[in-house]
Amino acid sequence: MQALLKDIYAHRELLSILVWRNIKIRYKGSVVGFFWTLLNPIFLIVIYAVFLGLLKIQVELEILVSGIIVWSFFDMCLGDALFIIIGNTNLIKKTAFPRAILPLSMVIANLVNFLLSLVVLGAYLASRGLIAPAYLPLLPLIIITQAALCLGLALIVCSLNVFFRDVEHLLGVLKLAWFFLTPVIYPLTYIFDKLPPLLQKLAFLNPMLGVVTAQRTAWMGSDLVAPDLVLFSLAVCWVILFVGVAYFEKTQKRFADVL
């Protein structure tokens, strides 16, 4: 890990170039361009507010919106990870650089988008008087933890997709199941209300459960249930990062041969 970090630091200029390239590609040809990063969460809040009101669904809008915005960062990283290696075949075959820079640059680019989305979320929550200032200092650490999870999974997914192209189709199904197993559209209390004790504890093996819950706690002071289990779930994020780095370093030597 230390050697990899030194190698990435030595290629930091390449990393910054790739981050900027990934940001520009996402909005290439768009009239509004980068401002979609701010407009998307605004439209999300408005649309959910309108339809939840029309359908009279008993879901707190702040719980729903905060969960979906946090999930979107995770979802984008996994989706982009599928093609971050196979989409840069020429670069991998012809240039010597640490291959981990490719998924890292993608995660950082998506993190920039996510941070701007959080600005909109924060403004919305502040307008409703829902922000709990006492917990906001926790937010940077939670964001870094989610980024670590996204990077770890991106390293695994992009490596697997080089050797097994069925990963693209399988990932869509897994993400859908993962979405409903994570308290994105419902609060954490539902898990304790609906599941037996054994399944409640197993649920916290899901790292996104800890991330979504911790984000809500940092913003609103909500979901303050079983903090020890939430911390365990957040620790899983870092375990996945180390597993992802180890797996990527083991497999990346064969990328050029397979591609």
Image (cartoon, helix red, strand yellow):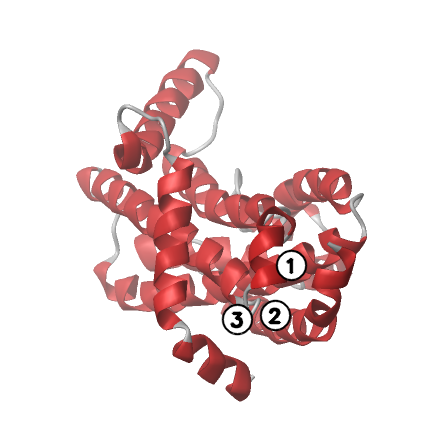
How many residues crowd around disc 3 within 10 Å: few (fewer than 14), some, or many (20 or more)?
some
The secondary element bearing badge 3 is classed as loop
Front disc: 3 or 2: 3
Which residue was labeled with disc 3? 97
> Is residue 170 or residue 229 the one in the foreground?
170
Quarter of image, res 196: bottom right
Q: Are marks 3 and 2 in contact (CB under 8 Å)?
A: no
Question: Against 170, is 85 above or below?
Answer: below
Question: Against 84, is 252 above or below?
Answer: below
How many residues crowd around disc 2 within 10 Å: few (fewer than 14), some, or many (20 or more)?
some
Quarter of image, res 166: top right
Which residue was labeled with disc 1? 206
In three-dimensional space, the C-alpha distance between marks 3 and 2, rounded to whole angstroms, equals 29 Å
Which residue was labeled with disc 2? 236
Q: Residue at x 69, y 64 (%)?
A: 201
Q: Work out which residue is located at the far top of the displayed protein and give it.
A: 54
In the rendered image, the quadrant that contains the C terminus is bottom right
The secondary element bearing badge 1 is classed as loop
x, y percentage for residue 209? Answer: 57, 55
Q: Residue at x 58, y 61 (%)?
A: 94
Q: Residue at x 31, y 32 (%)?
A: 36
Label 1 is placed on what type of residue?
A: Asn
Q: Residue at x 77, y 42 (%)?
A: 170
> Is residue 15 or residue 62 the one in the foreground?
15
The secondary element bearing badge 2 is classed as helix
Q: Are marks 1 and 2 in contact (CB under 8 Å)?
A: yes
Marks 3 and 2, the one that precedes in the sequence: 3
> Can the viewer see residue 196?
no
